[in-house]
Amino acid sequence: MDPECSQLLPALCAALADPRQPVADDTCLEKLLDWFKSVTEAGSSLLLLEDSPCLVELLSQALKAPGLSPAVLSFSLRLAGVLAAQEDCFEYLQQGELLPGLFGEAGPLGGAAWAAPTVRSGWIQGLRALAQHPSALRFLDSFGALDTVFSLQGDPSLFVASAAGQLLVHVLGLCMRGPAAGPPGPQAGDWPACAQKIVGHVEESLCSTATPRVTQALNVLTTTFGHCHSPWTQVLWVRLSPLVARLLEKDPIPAAHALVDLLLSVARSPARSATCDLWETMAQTLGRLSPMQAGPLALGVLKLQGCPQALRTQAFDILLQPLACVLKAAAQAPGPPGLPAGPAGDTAVVDALLSSRSACVGLLCQTLAHLELLLPMPQRPAPWPQAALLGATVAVLQFCGGSAVPASDVGGRLCVALAGCVRVQRAALDFLGALSQGAGPRELETQALAVLLGYLKSPDSSPTVLKKAFQATLRWLLSSPQPPGGCSLDPHTQLFLGELLPVLQKRLCSPCWEVRDSGLEFLTQMTRHWAGQAGFRHALLASEVPELAEQLLQDPESYVRASAVTAVGLLSSQGLHAARASPEPPGGPQKSLLLDLLHVLSTDAEGFPRRAVMQVFTEWLRDSHTEVAEDTERFVARVLQAASQDLDWEVRAQGLELALVFLVQTLGVPGPHCPCAVAAPVAAPPGQLAQALRVLCRVQLFEFAFRALFDCDRAVAQKACDLLLFLRDQAAPFASLQGAGSSPDVASVEATLQRWQAGEQGRPLGPLEPEAAMAVLRALDLEGLRGALAQSSDHVERSPQSLLQDMLAAAGALGDNEADCY
């Protein structure tokens, strides 16, 4: 411990132990405890107590001070556990009767403070911390702590109840770590005392008629098999599996979700090799649970390695049954093969679908989500019923959209239950988009695109559903087969595109801003992938979409303006922008998208559109966009000037990205992140470098980078530092150009930089010559600055000394100007 902290600690302990002092907030106490953990991990806890007797006094006061706040009392319990985790310190505290006092009946356990959940949580966490050695096990057994932990499993505070279960798992693992003669037998007498007590409690709970107790026992076992992989867990499962299997005889099955979690936890652990009954128990459970309860277990089974094929088939059938029922209810003729034909479980699924609207929605959403998770997995069942799933998902969307023609009474009731259900629509659209990656019959693919187009057209589609429909449509379009040559679209895709673009035009004019935004994002993604396709280019330019996208630069919603900037910038770079009207009168100034975007960058009140403009400009510069190439220096100078005055740090950071692109292009060297940059730089002629530096000065890149170097946002300053280091390294071989190191400009430049560093950023740098700029650049300690910037902004304030000072200041125990108030 630092000497400074040692001096502050007695006063802090006295303040914490005094009920009259203001209580430190929970965050400070948590940080203080973390610090003590780091101190004890690095050295001896006993030595810490001997050097800081005030800690023992604080723990003693926790027993004596009746008015101590629950937060401080909880902190004291946890601190005692941290210190007692080392066995010699445990014995020291045990001799002073501190530990029995804190954790026994004489302490908070038997007082009014126990009513506070914070205190109960601190008690559990303290025991969890000290339970690291055999002496702690004897201590827990001596004063009946386990009985209290058993009762806390049912605590009204979920945090306390969860911590109690985790403590039991930890103590059980610690007990079983001790015996060196191998794992115990299944008989009760073969287990250590604490372990036998915990396992006995679990057995009693599994036999209980109270569902909460069964849930607690199952949760303890789930955590045990999930965290402990020693051989003794196999013996534990052999001992307890008959009791778990007996739960399946009850109607209804108690704690079904917890039972599913346990079975999957055992199946993923070495304990599954202890008996062959696990797979049989899982098969019985799948048959006994309701369709909603069985879904997570079925998905878990299909994810397992080494699972019997019969069990996998049963699990997959259970996942498919809800969609099979939907498809059967909608089909006028037999649907595509691959889904269950209606075994005994079919009736239960139909009952679940029709029992209520909420049950129907919940089951379908869960089924669709599970199948979407399963779809990309290498262990998914084979053969995969692609056509059947595609038909069923289309049927679900038709039921939700009101376009389904029911084939039975079940279908009619599904129409009522699913009409306009946004939750099911979103889940089905997600799954339909995922199905685009598999091959299916052309007829079903056409139906999928038709139902997607219907959702995009429908006035009843909500903004979130439209967004999902756009995303699914994009996935289907991009997965469509490409004719040989790759420069044109498939005829079916081209035909669909002709129907889609008028719908997109309508959505770009929607009164709902989320819809306009989704339409622009769809346009951007489609253009990014298809800009080289002649059919797409012709269809897009023949539509009003580019013009509408450009009009949305003036949208009242900032998110839409930002999306419009991105879309229009991409369209322009691909030669797909709207045709500009001729100036009126003739000879007047020609309208320019570049000027429009510069106007957005300089005047838009929101940050999102301005950030989007900077990203577009960076791409334009990188790709030598036509409007940029006309006068690149003027373009860069105007953009850097606007970015330097922007209040949004992301705009300034993006300005540095643009500056780096221009720098690399001007110097004619690989960028710092280019793979070829690891090679030795090619020496350019001195005259060429001098010319490049003059260009950088003309566009005021040096001024922009120097100003950013002292930016109040650390990310901007780091980026500027990296850029200047790169520039300095590239210019290093040409030090002979720096003959004018004593230029009169250097002193004024350095003075301005010092004022910028002090926060006076108003004064400009003024005209700068390359010689002066490079002299200043070489004089800056960029490596030192980069090291300072690499530290977090609160590295001083996070020090233990600062924390102790702040807590003492909050308690009024420091004099003036002694607190580190940051």
Image: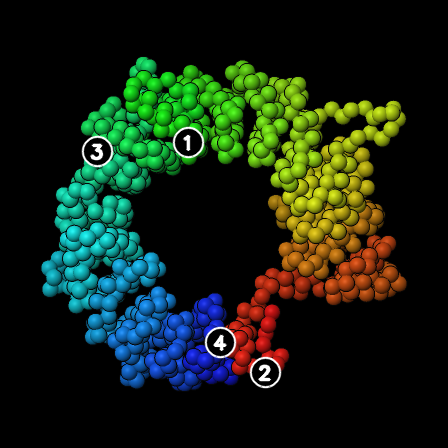
Front position among marks 2 and 3: 2
State the mark number for residue 421: 1
**Residue visible at 53% across and 75% down?**
810
Tag 4 secondary structure: loop
In this picture, is 117 found above or below 283? Answer: below
The answer to whether any part of residue 491 appears in the image is yes
The quadrant of the picture occupied by the C terminus is bottom right
**Residue visible at 57% across and 67% down?**
795
User: Where does label 2 land, which residue?
Assistant: 815
User: Where does label 3 land, which residue?
Assistant: 310
Amino acid type, label 3: Ala
Q: CA distance from mark 3 to mark 4?
A: 66 Å
Mark found first going from the N terminus, 4 or 1: 4
Mark found first going from the N terminus, 2 or 3: 3
Could you tell me residue 465's position as x and y percent? 48, 32
State the mark number for residue 22: 4
Crowd around label 1: few <14 · some 14–19 · many ≥20 (10 Å)? some
How many numbered callouts?
4
